[in-house]
Amino acid sequence: MFQNLTDKLQTIFKNLRGQGVISESNIKEGLREIQLALLEADVNYRIVKEFIENIAQEAVGQKVINNITPSQKLIKIVHDKLIELLGKEASSIKHSSNPPNIIMLVGLQGSGKTTTSAKLAKFLNKKEQSILLAGTDTQRPAAREQLQFLGKNLGLPVITEGKTPLDIAINAVKKAGSISADVLIIDTQGRLHINEELMDELIKMKKAVSPSEILLVADAMTGQDAVNIAKSFNEKLGITGVILTKLDTDTRGGAAISIRKVTGVPIKFIGTGEKTEDLEIFYPERMASRILGMGDILTLVEKAESEVNKDDAKKLVKKLKSEKLDLEDFLSQLRQMKKIGPLSKMLDYLPVEPGLKNMDISEERYKHIEAIILSMTPEERSEPRIIDGSRRKRIAKGSGTNVQDINQLLKQFYSVQKFIKGMVGKGSEMKRKGFLSPLISP
Ligand SMILES: Nc1nc2c(ncn2[C@@H]2O[C@H](COP(=O)(O)OP(=O)(O)OP(=O)(O)O)[C@@H](O)[C@H]2O)c(=O)[nH]1
Ligand SMILES: [Mg+2]
């Protein structure tokens, strides 16, 4: 996600790190580079200009406290301003006082409406709400079957009966009432461009079903187009939020950064993949940290909590806090990671050195690692430093691997251990910036 922008910003901050004191000239140079990086990421020009001006005002006027470097100071200010730009607080789905809570998903062709309808259904269903999905796309062949298929996989009801989109929507509201659904999610049809026909149809539907949410599904890859589309939908139809999809693909970040400010409408969720579980609540603060390359340990822990046994997740947090990670934990982390998804995807959330990101683990390698760790004595697992040459030979024999495999595993383990120490340890960058406070407070 936004790798280019993140890399650029990190280089800028790294270069500033060498400077002893904060001064107008080094801040100026840094800001000029940040401005360029944002423009290259396809952020709206006016927004970039205002953003840079705000930062300059704040940065130059401030006293530098001892032991804070110019780059730290600047990162802090950029981070704060970025959060403001992204909308400060996360914005959740509105509830209507009398169910069903009706949510309409609108957007251009291929933006991800149908996929996102299913994702949202799964997300809300997990929160113990009963869901009805309605497929109102009468135009594209097999569009309704697509939603039916997704609904079936989730074990959720889908209604597609009716001649016109409006008929289907009205039938759906009735059906939602008769089955006492908490939420009705209406998937609508897309068009290549915004045109009157589409808008008329959506406006009629809005009048007929009075939704509590109209969410625009916009493709982040289209950058400034997505921003203009959101603006236009908002002016014509009135939208209550945006779901930005395809953030897992190599997008430049412009849409995510500009859309809130340009439209005044919050981003509520982001789509991060093609599967129904690839939907995340949009947290401005976490997104700002991700953009700046500070990783996003909170998302990671939350994901771990929802996909993995809660007790295991608590143990992980506790271990992170105590900074003690042994091979036993390492193995159990690998097991959990296997449940959550590929390691490379997990690492997206963490402020990891690029080298570590390539440390993906194949099924075969995982089996090796498991065999190796299980061939160790409990003492060796908790105190890996005692594993000397002869122990390595014994473990290799016991696990059907060779000494190089053991060496490689221990090396990997130590680098993860070091990384975790640096991340949560005393005086670590994450801790100083208060990023871990929600985790560390009891
Ligand atoms: N990588 C990625 N692909 C996505 C995401 N969301 C949707 N897609 C893909 O985008 C394509 C279009 O998704 P649909 O859900 O069919 O889009 P739609 O807006 O319903 O399209 P129409 O009904 O034709 O207007 C599909 O191939 C989806 O798998 C996402 O967050 N990440
Ligand atoms: Mg569709």
Image (cartoon, grey):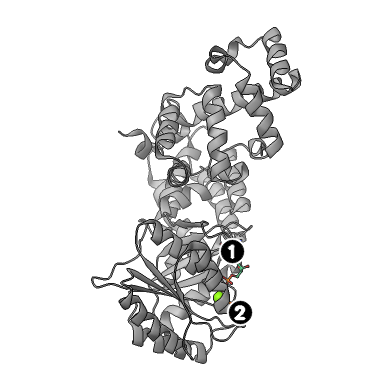
**Residue that label 2 marks:** 142
- Find residue 357 and report its image quarter: top right
Q: Which of marks 1 and 2 is nearer the N terminus?
A: 1
Q: In this view, does 326 lie above or below 391?
A: below
Task: Tell me the kind of residue under disc 1.
Answer: Asp
Please tell me in which quadrant of the rendered image residue 156 appears.
bottom left
Check residue 42 in the rendering and tell me which mark sits there, or answer none.
Answer: 1
SS state under label 1: loop
Q: Can the viewer see residue 46? A: no
Front-most of residues 57 and 314 = 314
Image mark for residue 177: none
Residue in the foreground of this view, choosing between 44 and 135: 135
Q: Quadrant of the C terminus?
A: top left
Left or right for 154, reference 363: left
Q: How crowded is mark 1: few (under 14 residues within 10 Å), some or many (20 or more)?
A: many
Which residue is located at x 59 percent, y 64 percent?
A: 42
